[in-house]
Amino acid sequence: MFDNLSDKLDRAFKVLKGHGKITEINVAETLKEVRKALLDADVNFKVAKQFTDTIKEKALGQNVLTSVSPGQLLIKITHDELTNLMGGQKEEIFLGGNPTVILMSGLQGSGKTTFTGKLANYLKTKKGKSPLMVACDVYRPAAIDQLHVLGEQIGVPVFSNKEEKNPTKIAEAAIKQAKENGNSVVLIDTAGRLAIDEMMMNEISDLKKAIKPNEILFVVDAMTGQDAVNTAKAFNDRLDFDGVILTKLDGDTRGGAALSIKSVVNKPIKFVGTGEKMEALDVFYPERMSDRILGMGDVVTLVERAQEQYNEEEARKLSKKIAKNQFDLNDFLSQLQQIKKMGNIKDLVGMIPGVGKAIKDADIKDDAFKHIEAIIYSMTPTERNKPETINGSRRQRIAKGSGLNITEVNKLLKQFEDTRKMMRMMNDKNAMAKMMRNMPKMPGGPQ
């Protein structure tokens, strides 16, 4: 996500490296490269020009502090302007109304149905709501079936009527049922088309007038770049929607839609889809996205994802086991599975400041932990509880059972033992203090 844009912006800022002060000439050279980078990312031309003009105006009016280099100052100004360009601050969906009615709109293939499932899951698990999903795509039976499958997967009811061909009547019946059953939110999945057409626009406009939704969301595929912005404008002219949802932001996305859409339609990006799983939905934070585009990482989102997977009671139990040197392979496996639930592994690692650029060409697959799970699942309960009992013959048996060679088994057991030692050391205050005292003696350590 945004890797290409991040690289080009990084190269642009290097133009200022070594300069003692900001001048009109060196700023112009840098911003020329910044504008090129934005246009390559498929950002709207007018938006890119306005963006760089604003940065130039602010940069030339700044006095550079002795502790701040011109390059650092320009990065700071660019960061602030990127944040403003994408909306300035987060804006979540409106959840008033009884029930709250949310209408999805967008082109076919934009990911409306999948997003409807993700949003239902988000509202249920994180907001404590009781959602009802409504299948109003009367043209594609597969879309109705897909919504039912997603509903079963996340435990959310779905209202549909394959015999009825009028989406307004389906939506009205669903809202009536939601009131009777106590559903607090109604999510209406509508039909899309391969291109904008008058029939589709009239249909969704009629639906809006009839049900008067509390919120209209425009769902768009982030990989379509500038086309996404043009489509958003056409939909907004007819529907006056409340917010934008960018899907497939984990793919080969240049970033033009995310950077242009707010300026063109003046509507905030509210959520971004970051994967195929139902949990792969993030509230959009403009400032955090600016951090990531400029290679600063996104530690806050990383910590929040971790907090969602861990609770205090589990952490307390694990801490006690570590303190008593009882951390075993069951615990090790559990920790890996919690990490997997946090999302795409490469995306997670890229949130660590300075690491994103280092791993941009690395092939980190989502199934990176699969061989570790296979090895641990091939062990007996005793071996998992007491790894020290795993001798040579047991290792041979585990290797055969997992379909891997004994080298992989040995490697995992060593990694586990190293992890256990580190955890013991972190719990041993005396050991930690001794390590800190010895740090000045280490080559290159802090003095």
Image: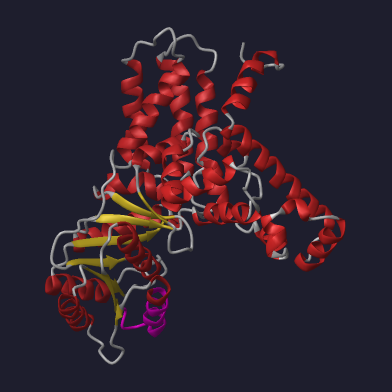
Quadrant in the picture for residue 96? bottom left
At x 78%, y 68%, the residue is 401
User: In the displayed structure, does residue 366 sit left or right of residue 180?
Assistant: right
Q: In the image shown, does 273 or 152 lie closer to the viewer?
A: 152
Which residue appears farthest toward the top when viewing the image? 66
Percent from the top left, x then y, of residue 312? 42, 47
Percent from the top left, x then y, of residue 124? 31, 64
User: In the displayed structure, does residue 89 sit left or right of residue 27?
Assistant: left
- In this orientation, does residue 445 appear? no
Whether residue 404 is in magenta: the answer is no
- In this orientation, does residue 95 appear? yes
Magenta-highlighted residues: 136-150
At x 50%, y 41%, the residue is 351
At x 55%, y 32%, the residue is 354
Is the C terminus in the top left, top right, bottom left or bottom right quadrant?
A: top right
226 is higher (above) or lower (below) than 86: below
Which residue appears farthest toward the front when viewing the image? 324
16 is higher (above) or lower (below) than 99: above
Q: How many marks?
A: 0
User: In the displayed structure, does residue 53 sit left or right of residue 205?
Assistant: right
Quadrant in the picture for residue 134? bottom left
Q: In the image shown, does 312 or 207 lie closer to the viewer?
A: 312
Colour scheme of this structure image?
Answer: secondary structure
Q: In the image shown, does 408 or 23 lie closer to the viewer?
A: 408
Percent from the top left, x then y, of residue 166? 22, 85
Whether residue 141 is in magenta: the answer is yes
Secondary structure mostly taken by the magenta-highlighted segment of the chain: helix
Percent from the top left, x then y, of residue 93? 24, 55
Q: In the image shown, does 80 or 172 lie closer to the viewer?
A: 172
At x 49%, y 43%, the residue is 40
Quadrant in the picture for residue 138? bottom left
